[in-house]
Amino acid sequence: MNVTYAQLEEIYDRPFFELIEESHRVHKKHWPGSEVQLCTLLNIKTGACSEDCGYCSQSAHHNTGLKPEPLMPVEEILPHAQAARDNGATRFCMGAAWKGVREGDRRFDSVLESIREVSKLGMEVCVTLGHLNDSEAKKLKEAGVTAYNHNIDTSPEYYPQVISTHTFDDRLATIGAVQRAGMSVCCGGIIGMGETRRDRLRMLEVLANLNPPPESVPINCLVPVAGTPLESRAEPVKIFELVRLIATARIVLPLSKVRLSAGRTSLTQEGQALCFFAGANSFFYGDKLLTTPNPGENEDMELLAALDLQPLEPYSPASVPVS
Ligand code: SAM
Ligand code: DTB
Ligand code: SF4
């Protein structure tokens, strides 16, 4: 979809109930069921990251007190993946805190082996491993990766205020490699980092104009981490601004899964219900994100039951949109 900034602004600024009525209508047209995707995260390599992302607990540039851990071998990863599947996860997402993978590095070979094993469990397999070139992306696809998560995080204009060790264009280059390799792109961002409404909409503009648009779009609310530069710039996200952004994303990215991501522990259940009504159809499931807390599994299952929503079966017809 070719979407302009002016169109995004017009959608976002509609009277609140008109906006969410429209986004709910678009949602029902393309996602007629009441399924929600449950993605479970596992941090397979923790901390000591060379990048300086201002929000991140895992950057070696910030003193967050996080204890670095080396890359988990396949035998340590598999029990986590099995537990996630047994608890009802649809997608298993493995994250590594480093700048990117390097072909020929034994750590990359170890990740490829883990992907091959996890993909036998029947869940969708997502990884988020930083920067990739074409041939690395191809190897990940061949190993069984369904989707690659690589966020643009904010607008091109605000990006240098958040990160200095790589550029917005570096992020787009990796997204290009992921697309050429035939993996789905999972790409979204963070709000609550002191950015403006314009930055949020510029971020959506870039996402909506990716060709093809991302298969999934995580919308994270900043989890302020002590010791990070953004701790002091953090602004609690206003729930109706989050709902407006999700509704706008649903309208301009009708075929994408919109994921209510980090920051749910600061939202009420009623607030989350509004997000699902406005068009979110995925969330992170399990009591830990990568390094920070997430609502408990029982609490989330109760929320789904109360809203008459069902966990999405991986690879089921309901996991693809009606176009
Ligand atoms: N190192 C890889 C990368 O940068 O793509 C993968 C892991 S990184 C932690 C994945 C994403 O998590 C980031 O792009 C960001 O959107 C999100 N994230 C990290 N820390 C966060 C925080 N404190 N609050 C909200 N989202 C966060
Ligand atoms: C995404 O957009 N959010 C997830 C996932 N992709 C990898 C990560 C959220 C991390 C929140 C902070 C933490 O737990 O360290
Ligand atoms: Fe490293 Fe990713 Fe954290 Fe940036 S967001 S510091 S690249 S782990």
Image: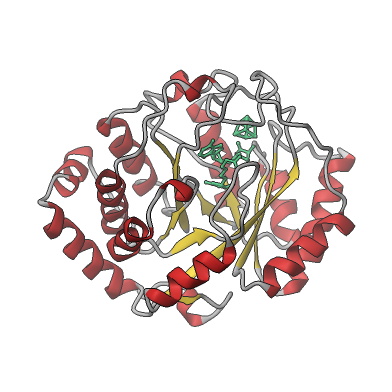
Q: Residue at x 67, y 39 (%)?
A: 133
Q: In the figure, 181 relative to 52: above or below?
A: below
Which residue is at the front of the view, 263 or 248?
263
**How far from the left and from the top, in percent, is residue 44?**
76, 47
Image location (x, y in percent) of residue 250: 31, 58
Q: Quadrant of ligand 1?
A: top right
- Residue 131 percent location from the top left of the image: 64, 36
Residue 41 figure quarter: bottom right
What is the total number of numbered labels drawn onto the structure image?
0
Q: Is residue 228 above or below residue 278?
A: above
Colouring used for the render? secondary structure
Residue situated in front as seen by the camera: 171 or 274: 274
Q: Is residue 279 left or right of residue 262?
A: left
Q: Answer left or right for 242 relative to 304.
A: left
Q: Which x, y percent locates residue 201?
A: 28, 38
Q: Residue at x 31, y 47 (%)?
A: 242
Q: Is residue 99 above or below residue 30?
A: above
Which of the image's four quarters has the C terminus? bottom left
